[in-house]
Image (tube, rainbow, N blue to C red):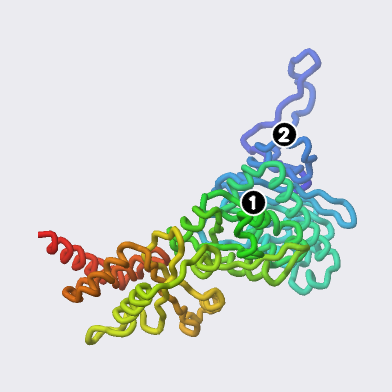
Amino acid sequence: MPYPIGVLDEEKEPTKPTKEDGTVDEDAPAVAATPSIINNTEPLWKKDPKELKDEDYKNFYRSMFPMDPEPLFWIHLKVDHPFILEGILFFPKLNKNQPFKENNIRLYSKQVFVSDNVKNVIPDFLSLLKGSIDSTDIPLNVSRSALQGDPNIRRISNYVIKKVGESLKKLYRTDREKYEAIWEDIGIFIKYGCVSDTKFDETMRDMVIFKNADNNYVTLPEYKEQIPADKKEKLADKVLYFEAGKSDYSLRNTLKEEGVQSIETEDHIDPHFMQHVETKKIGDNEYKFASVDSEIHNVLDVENTTEEDIKIKDLFTKILVGETKEGEEAALSGTEVEIQKIKNSTSPAYFKTDEQMKRFAKMAQSMGQNAMFPTKKTLVINPSNALIQNALKIHEKGNNTELVDKICHHVEDLATISSEGLKNEDKDHFVKRSTDLIQELTNLAL
C-alpha cells in the first residue's frame, strides 16, 4: 500500500515527553505510544534499478514467493510514455514435480492490488514468469471484455514482450555461460514465445540453443557454420536432430566421427518449434529438420550392395517378417527390412522412420489420437557388421536354424533398445530370448 499502516501495542502506556536536558517533563500531557509501521510504502519496482543490488531483488522475490528457490534472473520494467508501467518479472526455476500455476504475476494500480489474473495483459508464453506489474493504465475492472476493449492493454503487452526479448538477448551476448546454465529452465519460455509472437521470434530465434552430440550448446546459425565443407552440399539447409532418449547413439557417433554434428530435441515444444522455423522464414536463413536415422544414409558414403548383402536382407526378412511361429505375430509385421552399407558404421542394425510419418504421428499424439497414425519403421541392416555376417554363414551351413533365428531377433532387439527402448511388455521377451541365445552359444563351446 502507498500509505503507512501502523499497529499500536495496547500494552504500551502513554509516556511523558522529555525536556531538552533529558529529564521527564511532569507538567506536560502524556503522549500516546508510537504505532509500529508494518508495511513497505515503497515497493522495489518503484526504486531506481541502478540503486538496487542482486540481493535486493532476491529478497523481494522471497517475500512474494517464500517457498520457491532463487530466481534465475529478472527484468525491471519502468516506462512513463506512452503509458505508465512499473514492475519486476522473475524467471523462476521450474519444478517439474509441481503443477503449473497461472496466477504468478500480480497486477497493481498505484500499489493497490487489483488481480492476479493477467490474461490479455501478459501473453500466454510469459505466464510462467512470476512478479508484479503496477500501472495506472490497467483498468481496475479486469474482466476479459474490459481488457480486450482497452487500447492500452495491447501496448503494455507488446512492451513487456519487447523488454523480455531485449533482456534475454543482452544476457545471451554478455554472459553466454549463464545463459546456457539456465537454458533448461528458460528454453521452454523462449521456444514457446518464438512460436507465439512474431516480434519475439525475430528477436530470439537465432538465440535458441540446442545440445549437440558433444553435449555443447549451439544455435541454428552456429550449427550451419560447423558443417564440414565436404558435407555442405549434401546437407544444404538440413539440421540433423536426435530425440532425447529415443535415438540410436551409434548413429550419432558415426556422424560425429565424420565431422557431422546433430542436435538433441525433446517431445513437448520442439516439434512445434521446428515446424514453425521451417514454415516461417526470417531473413536469408532457411532450415529443414531431419532425424539422424532418416538421413544418415544420404549424408555419409554408402557402398554398393553385393549379392551377399541381398542374401542377408532375404534372411532377415524371412525370419522377422515372412515367417512366424504358430500362435505368434511377426515382430516386424507391416514393416520392411533394408540393407545399407554405410562406411565406418559399426552398428549391426538400426530403425529408420520416414520423417513426414514421424511428424504426423507426433501431431496425432499431441491430439490424443495415437491409433490414427501408427508409426511404420524400417529395420536397416548393416551387412558389414561381423555379427550379421556370422549369422549368414551359420544359415548357409544349414545345421543350426534355431541359432540363426535367435541371432536375427537379437539384432532386432538391439536396434529397438538403441532407438526408443523396449516397452514394458517386450522386456520379458528380450530377457528370455537373450538367455536362450547365450545358453545355446555357451553349449557350443562345451
441 and 86: which is toward the camera: 441
Above or below: residue 65 compared with residue 441: above
Q: Nearer the viewer, residue 242 or 145?
A: 242
The reply to whether residue 63 is in sight is no
N-terminal of the pair, mark 2 or mark 1, is 2
Residue 94, percent across and down?
A: 56, 54
Type of amino acid under label 1: Phe
Specify whether residue 51 is in view. Answer: yes
Q: Which residue is the extreme one toward the bottom?
A: 327
Q: The disc labelled 2 sits on which kind of residue?
A: Thr
Tell me the CA gap for discs 2 and 1: 40 Å
Question: Disc 2 or disc 1, which is closer to the eye?
Answer: 1
Q: Residue at x 31, y 67 (%)?
A: 389
Picture coordinates of residue 445 (x, y %)?
13, 59
Q: Residues within 10 Å of mark 1 (few under 14, many from 20)?
A: many
Query: Could you say where residue 414 lies in the image, as x and y percent from the top left?
Result: 34, 65
Q: Which residue is mark 1?
A: 91
> Which residue corresponds to mark 2?
34
